Amino acid sequence: MNKRFISHEDWIRYAVLFLVVLCAGAWSRAYAEEQKLACSEEITQYCKGVKPGGGRLLVCLKEHEKDLTPSCREKVAGIEKRLEEAKQLCAVDTEKFCKGIQPGEGRIAKCLNEHIEEISPDCRGKVSGLKKMIPEKKSYQ
């Protein structure tokens, strides 16, 4: 017998699955927006005029750490932890592809990004993950 119609139970399963996916997507977008905005007020207040990129905003926020909100302090600490993990995980790739590059102002990260297809998969994953954590480059003037 050829079944052309979805049973009532299957229809309910599909509807529930659709709602779960829809809610998960909305939660994910809201969480991402919240994370992106975690330090925007502090950047505007304490880092006005700091040119984004090269870790300059992170350095500025660290200089004002005592003045940051708890959520921003947590975000900065998380970024620092991930940066240290990336430094350790990418040590071999850094030595291989970025030998002679002076650390600071994002030069090592830029070098690793230029060799993204050549670096180890673990390092590539860590470097890509860090890009998502760093606030978007926009002018805070």
Image: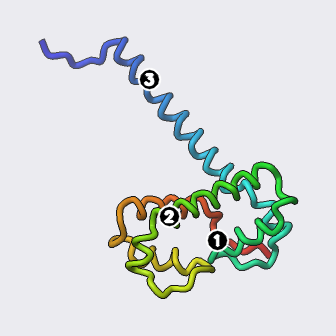
**Secondary structure category for the residue under label 3:** helix
* Quarter holding residue 36: bottom right
Q: Earlier in the sequence, mark 2 or mark 1?
A: 2
Residue 5 in the image: above or below residue 45: above
Residue located beneath label 3 in the image? 15
Q: Residue at x 75, y 58 (%)?
A: 39
Percent across and percent down for residue 113 are 45, 74
**Secondary structure category for the residue under label 1:** loop
Q: Residue at x 22, y 19 (%)?
A: 4
Q: Residue at x 45, y 70 (%)?
A: 91
Residue located beneath label 2 in the image? 88
The answer to whether 12 appears left or right of 83 in the picture is: left
What separation in Å lies between label 3 and label 2 (alpha carbons)?
46 Å
Residue 121 in the image: above or below residue 92: above
Query: Which three-letter amino acid code belongs to the residue tagged 1?
Result: Lys
Q: Residues within 10 Å of mark 1 (few under 14, many from 20)?
A: few
Q: Residues within 10 Å of mark 2 (few under 14, many from 20)?
A: few
**Secondary structure category for the residue under label 2:** helix
Instruction: Say which of marks 2 and 1 sits in front.
Output: 2
Taking depth in this image into account, of 89 and 32 the one nearest to the observer is: 89
Residue located beneath label 1 in the image? 137
What separation in Å lies between label 3 and label 1 (alpha carbons)?
40 Å
Instruction: Say which of marks 3 and 2 sits in front.
Output: 2
* Quarter holding residue 117: bottom left
Query: Which three-letter amino acid code belongs to the residue tagged 2?
Result: Gln
Q: Are marks 3 and 2 in contact (CB under 8 Å)?
A: no
**The N terminus: image quadrant:** top left
